[in-house]
Amino acid sequence: VNENGLHFVCCFYIISCRDKAPTRRTGKGTAGNHNSRRTDTMFSKSRIAAAITLATLATPALAEDTDARIQRLEAELEELKAAVEATAEAVEQAPAGAASSKSNLGHYSHGHGSLKGRTTIGGYGELHYNNWRARQGSGKKEEADFHRFILFLGHEFNDRIRFFSELEVEHAISGDSQPGEVALEQAYLEFDINEGTRAMAGLLLMPVGLINETHEPPTFYGVERPVVDKYILPSTWTEAGAQLSGELGNQGLSYDLLVTTGLNGGTNIRGGRQGGAEAQASDLAYTARLKWTGVPGLELAGTVNYQTDMTQDRSDNIGSGLLLTAHARYTVSKLTLTGLYAGWDISGDGARSTNKDRQDGYYLEASW
């Protein structure tokens, strides 16, 4: 209120903030696209200034001089613009952790985690019930078993470095004379080298088949996993080592290259998994996979795994092992078609004499 009457000055201003969350690959894993904090969250000064609307409603008792009123309003507008500029500068200088409200761990977690701390905690479980009898012979199985309980813990240290881990309890109870066990299923650090390439080191899931990397119960049909994925591709198969992964172009083609500890069971593929537990490393294993997902709903992949000695002992009569596996999966609406092949070729007289030098299997599946 002044000598010229009563004035109402209504100031409306909109501050626009953009939060751009990085994207990642599927299955246990796509490469992150990490932009700088100034790109992820910034105030557009030009947009802010343009969004300021100043409206004045005056009901003067005595008319104010028009030129004086314009000058006063211009001065008030400049003050408002200066305040918004200061706010924008403060936000641009905020810590990097405050610039993003989403964690890159979201894709990998099996549950919901804390986004505020960039830490994700999740998990899942499988309770199996089997009740069947063999058509021939006396074989039968009448059993309830809490087969697996998995706890997931992941943490994003910054935009380029992350940690992932899974701790598994099998068959509910572990200990002497008990059927269960407690084991690490995976635990590794991931580093972004550039926009399309990343490196991992630690206890890694081997990139073979459809189930080994993504083995949650909805991935397969039936109570138990397919026989091929249990004995030929011994899911869940983890080894200690290093991995390099990335994308080749932008047409859905990706690659994985690994150097890890190898199997140590001779012709017993499933029994040869070492899982990073005082693993013998005399003869390492080398793995390469190509995967293509360039058509929506379609996945094609092939993996080669080679190790120079399947027993980590070159003095015996079992030699090298070569694994070749390929799969295709196509989903249209609610229909999914799947095909998978896997085969081992094991050298040495010891493998040939027991007819276990060649071990392979396949399956075809249609689901609705």
Image (tube, grey):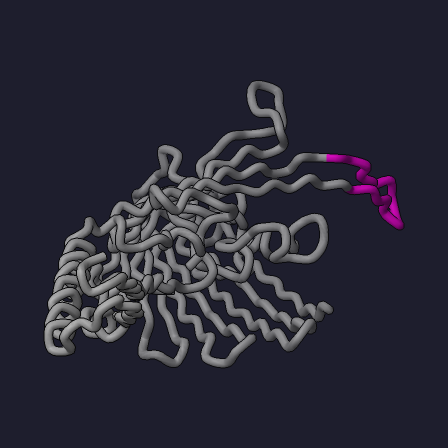
Residue at image point 31% right, 69% down = 57
Start-end of magenta stretch: 130-144
Nearer the observer, 6 or 319 = 6
Q: Please state if 186 lies on the left or on the right of 147 as rendered.
A: left
Where the N terminus falls, by quadrant? bottom left
Asked if 20 appears above or below 114 in the picture, the reply is: below
Nearer the observer, 249 or 19 = 19
Which residue in the rendered view is the most extreme toward the front? 62
Residue at image point 52% right, 57% down = 357
> How far across and how far down the image is residue 341, in percent?
57, 67
> How far across and how far down the image is residue 244, in percent?
29, 60
> How far across and how far down the image is residue 253, in percent?
39, 75
Q: Is residue 101 visible?
A: yes
Where the C terminus falls, by quadrant? bottom right
Residue at image point 36% right, 54% down = 104
> How far across and how far down the image is residue 42, in percent?
23, 63
Residue 364: which quarter of the image?
A: bottom right
Asked if 275 appears above or below 355 in the picture, the reply is: above
- Within the magenta stretch, is there residue 366? no
Residue at image point 18% right, 60% down = 3
Q: Please state if 4 lies on the left or on the right of 282 as rendered.
A: left
